[in-house]
Amino acid sequence: MASKIALLQINPIVGDISGNASLISDFAEQASQSGASLAVTTELAISGYPPRDLLLQSDFVQSCNDVANSLKSVIPILVGTPVPSHGERSLPGNGVVRAGDSVREITRKQLLPTYDVFDEARYFEADERPGIARTIAGLDIGVTICEDAWQHCGATPNDYDSDPIAQIVEWGRQGVVLDATVNLSASPYHANKSGIRLAVARSAAASLNHPFLLANQVGGNDDLLFDGRSVVAWPDGTAVVAPAWVEGVLIADLSNPQNCIWLGEGELTVLNPTDEISDGDEGLLDAIIIGLSDYCRKSGISKIVLGLSGGIDSALAACIASAAVGAANVTGISMPSKHSSQHSIDDARSTAEALGIEFSLQPIMDLHNAADTALAELLANGNPVAGENLQARLRGLVVMAHANANGAMAIATGNKSELGQGYCTLYGDMAGGYAPLGDLYKMEVYALAREFNKRIGLDAVNESTLTKPPSAELAPDQKDEDSLPPYPILDEILRLHIEGGLDATEITSRGHDGEVVRDVLTRLARNEHKRWQMPPAPRVSMRAFGQGWRQPLAARHDWRQ
Amino acid sequence: MASKIALLQINPIVGDISGNASLISDFAEQASQSGASLAVTTELAISGYPPRDLLLQSDFVQSCNDVANSLKSVIPILVGTPVPSHGERSLPGNGVVRAGDSVREITRKQLLPTYDVFDEARYFEADERPGIARTIAGLDIGVTICEDAWQHCGATPNDYDSDPIAQIVEWGRQGVVLDATVNLSASPYHANKSGIRLAVARSAAASLNHPFLLANQVGGNDDLLFDGRSVVAWPDGTAVVAPAWVEGVLIADLSNPQNCIWLGEGELTVLNPTDEISDGDEGLLDAIIIGLSDYCRKSGISKIVLGLSGGIDSALAACIASAAVGAANVTGISMPSKHSSQHSIDDARSTAEALGIEFSLQPIMDLHNAADTALAELLANGNPVAGENLQARLRGLVVMAHANANGAMAIATGNKSELGQGYCTLYGDMAGGYAPLGDLYKMEVYALAREFNKRIGLDAVNESTLTKPPSAELAPDQKDEDSLPPYPILDEILRLHIEGGLDATEITSRGHDGEVVRDVLTRLARNEHKRWQMPPAPRVSMRAFGQGWRQPLAARHDWRQ
């Protein structure tokens, strides 16, 4: 008998317990109709990942567990769900429940990642061993949860005391014969991560000497993105990888990789033992689009409004928005001031027309003059940055008025390079409910704009926008390069520091000018107060600006300046 | 020989390694001159608490450790400092180093709190046993770090696997005789916590059968406040408690509680075995003031600007600001609009005059008219909230222009009740670098205003402000109660939910109207996006709005509505 196990690559909504349960039942039903005899969900599929402080609410965990236990299904399902704590002064578990043919708890996660975007030691108590689901659809299956599989090949930043994959291997030596091991995952996306996940699966399969099946969540939840790409690996390194960024079911034929099926958009990638996979700029563009699109859908937001300056950032943001919620639901506002060039309006209009979004021309000269008059004394004697910020904030005011009047969400269009240098205005261009480009360096913004044009076969971002020197246009003839290093250099310094963890000396030793490096890192530290108030941004890099793990704002002394 | 141990109750700046080291040396020198033969710092005194992601920077931990090891002192010091990891794939320790007479590492923290405001499992690897500093100033001393002592009396939310106090007790049974046990703490303030800390110290001393000495950090670091109140407890329950909110040195005479000395402002409280301590509204006022004052001092901010509406919140915020940075450095701006009453200007001016802060009258009618004209079509057809927010945002614009022109920090004046209900405007009254009242319920704002008046012997918040019905004055004859339940009721519902963890059913069963409760909790959930962008607020309650442990914004479904 060929055993077929279905990996349910779903996009749950955090907190929507009943909706997520329906999603699982529907996918399991489809899987069953296509010949699967067992279904496996992603990690914490019932609550959605990450549930964060919902887990602290008195009956949330109990509700999740109750719903998981009562899931209706024609085939057995291994369901990821929070499971209740063992006592008054202990924490819940990140568990797997068997539902469908019989109901019982199978295991709780052992390795609780508590670094970077993960906070699991805050919410869960660790188990001491992996699980086994016995005689489920005629199989005996090892059960692990996400991080549990990552220690084995050394792919976690720090060592854990135990290695659940090695524990199952040891059970095998002691005579426990398993047909496969599954892994319920919510493994977030960052650029070029799919190769690591594949290595994790291959390493586990090789050690276990049986197939290893990893079901991964897909979609965006606030600033966390999940790319799917569920994977099945065999001991010889053969692997089958599901498509990224779409829901679907991977039906794995344990005895024949070529017989695996994908129910959903796109198709499976079958890899020979030495084949690698990679994700290019196209994956990054998908990541950003799905991040915004899921944020809107899951929060009940249907319309987006943004300022269209004629610059590259707002042009790409408009492209992303139109892809995320549909061009008919996007408004771009051009807000020329006395410092704006004609090309700013023309380029903004060109993007709006190419995308088919609503274009609104809202000059701010009169409003700006009224503000200048009202604040004349103040502006005459104070720091000139007050005037530049005033202009940016009047634009924020107009965009937010549009948003509030029409029930739309404003998006902030800043990128990671600007935000990292504080080259942006709090309550001005930083205003908005979501910052789609907030984790993209400036040069990535250019690359994605070209990629987007290519994808739709139209210059939504026109040549002028792509080639003119970047300018905030908040003062006469202002250019970004008057205040910042050229972006290719700035981006590299920021990336080496933020993602590579290098300090000024180390970055300088890689050939950068010492003074430039020091200035960049000083501005980075000094402008932390702005990032504290930054809207959520989809995380696509190895290390984004912190939200939950930020440095104290007051840490401005001596250190690294 | 009477052994005297000095507890250095210091206010370090996070990241200011050399400054913190000097502070420790200076205090140890004072302690020595007053007869102490050993000094003990607070937890992570060299880095300041909480160092958060500074700990991930490549050489920060090494720098801290180097500086701790090379501290110059005439008496030995037990210094709290990050200490290097044991290997490439392990984390640093939260350690104690012996400096002065001899240099060595004594111990690393065992119990790493990872709940509420704590994230220690993210940054540190746990040790397996407490430390002993032998023949230090002629004594043998047990050494523990903050949370290490809290498990023993059950004062942690969840059980740990080990209990360092019990381990030392067990060593005693095996013949290890210690003269005292010290505890280096950075134990944050919240209202009524001092009693718990005292219970922890008494419980440890009773079990250990020798004196237990806890040195606690004082001062504010962003949203975390530390109240000091270092404590020495003897086995019979006698205890000596240092003053709150001030730096100083507690010189403990182990053999005679009455001989303990405090070097610094205020005085020691000597408690008999059954005496309790409590902290009233006065402690809360001190907490808020020191939070703002330290935030400014540690961030290099000397001037504060705020909108003065004539309402209770901005009046109290002005009082706090004048106490924090001095009246001469505070500007209050009254910005009357067409909806403002004369009493709004009069009451604002009355507060400014009583405090002696600069008062600036900046009517926004003309600016508002210009904005109404520019956005006429939009405002005519859209949701009326757009117009109300416009007015609040124009005020934000004016305050920020003042701030930028004069190098001042704007403060946001909203309270926890409003913020919890979204009864505030993003980029409007929420604009600012710090929100001093952000963790105070509305009724606490009233209480603290009266307390402040009493303290300075002047009605800085006048009777009119204290007694008129709260109004946002964003629309004609608007009252807060048109949109919200009366504040005493709103506050209680919010407190039961946020701090008590009760759900709608449980709150209703305590006598509140079911529909009101549901509305309040629904607004609380729906307005989470605003709190994501809230400036740092000093945490004074058992549970504040999360910054690092927030619920996902998208968690709006079904759950608890």
Image: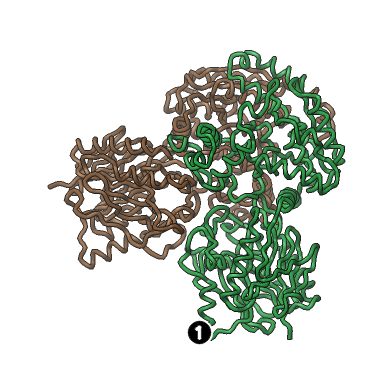
Chain colours: A brown, B green
Residue A76 placement: quadrant: top left
Using the image as rendered, state which of residue A190 and residue B390 is in the foreground.
Answer: B390
Q: Residue at x 41, y 47 (%)?
A: A61
* Mark 1 burial class by Cα count in 10 Å: few <14, some 14-19, many 20+: few
| Residue A323 image position (x, y, % from top left) | 45, 27
Using the image as rendered, state which of residue B125 and residue B364 is in the foreground.
Answer: B364
Query: Residue extending furthest left?
Result: A1
Q: Residue at x 25, y 54 (%)?
A: A133
As displayed, is residue B398 above or below residue A331? below
Circle 1 residue:
B174
- The quarter of the picture where the N terminus of chain B appears is bottom right
| Callout 1 secondary element | loop
Residue B72 placement: quadrant: bottom right
The answer, for residue A511, to whether it is visible in the render is yes
Q: Is residue A399 left or right of residue A5?
A: right
As displayed, is residue B339 above or below residue A153? above
Residue type at mark 1: give it.
Answer: Gln
As displayed, is residue A312 above or below residue A486? above
The answer, for residue A446, to whether it is visible in the render is no
